[in-house]
Amino acid sequence: MDEALEVVDVVADSGFEGLIAWALRIAGLLAILAGLGLWLGTEMGLLVIPALLILGGLVLLVAPSVLLALAEFA
């Protein structure tokens, strides 16, 4: 966790935190859409790969906000 906060601190100091946060959010949204597409496009139940894509996409949507908030407090 300390390494992630150090990386976020370096990014925040460089001034690109907004650009990187939005890039991660777009990647998360694409992962969610890909997971939903795989899940709804197959005739089987909830598969492992679509579930992992959806959960990973949710993490990518939330992680930039949480990490930047933690870096401001640290």
Image: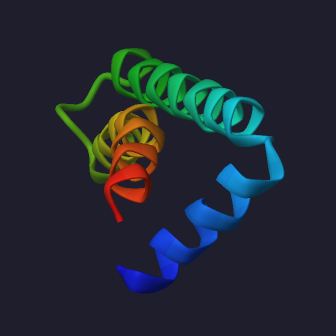
Tell which of 38 and 6 is nearer to you: 6
Residue at the image position 59 percent from the left and 63 percent from the top: 9
Residue at position x 39%, y 47% in the image? 56
> Which image quarter holds the N terminus?
bottom left
60 lies above or below 23: below
Residue at the outermost left position: 45
Between 72 and 4, the one lying in front of the other is 72
On screen, residue 51 above or below 35: below
* Rendered image quadrant of residue 54: top left
On the rendered structure, is 3 left or right of 22? left
Whether residue 49 sits left or right of residue 46 in the image: it is: right
**Image spot of residue 47 (x, y percent):** 26, 44
Asked if residue 22 lies left or right of residue 70, the reply is: right
Q: Is residue 25 above or below residue 66?
A: above
Rendering quarter of residue 63: top left
The residue located at (43%, 57%) in the rendering is: 71
Foreground of the two, 20 or 53 = 20
Q: Quadrant of the C terminus?
A: bottom left
- The answer to whether residue 55 is above or below residue 2 is above
Report the number of discs.
0
Residue 61: x percent and y percent? 43, 31
Where, by quadrant of the figure, is residue 51 drawn?
A: top left
With 53 as the anchor, is 10 left or right in this view?
Answer: right
- Tell me what residue is drawn at x 30 percent, y 42 percent: 55
Colour scheme in the image?
rainbow
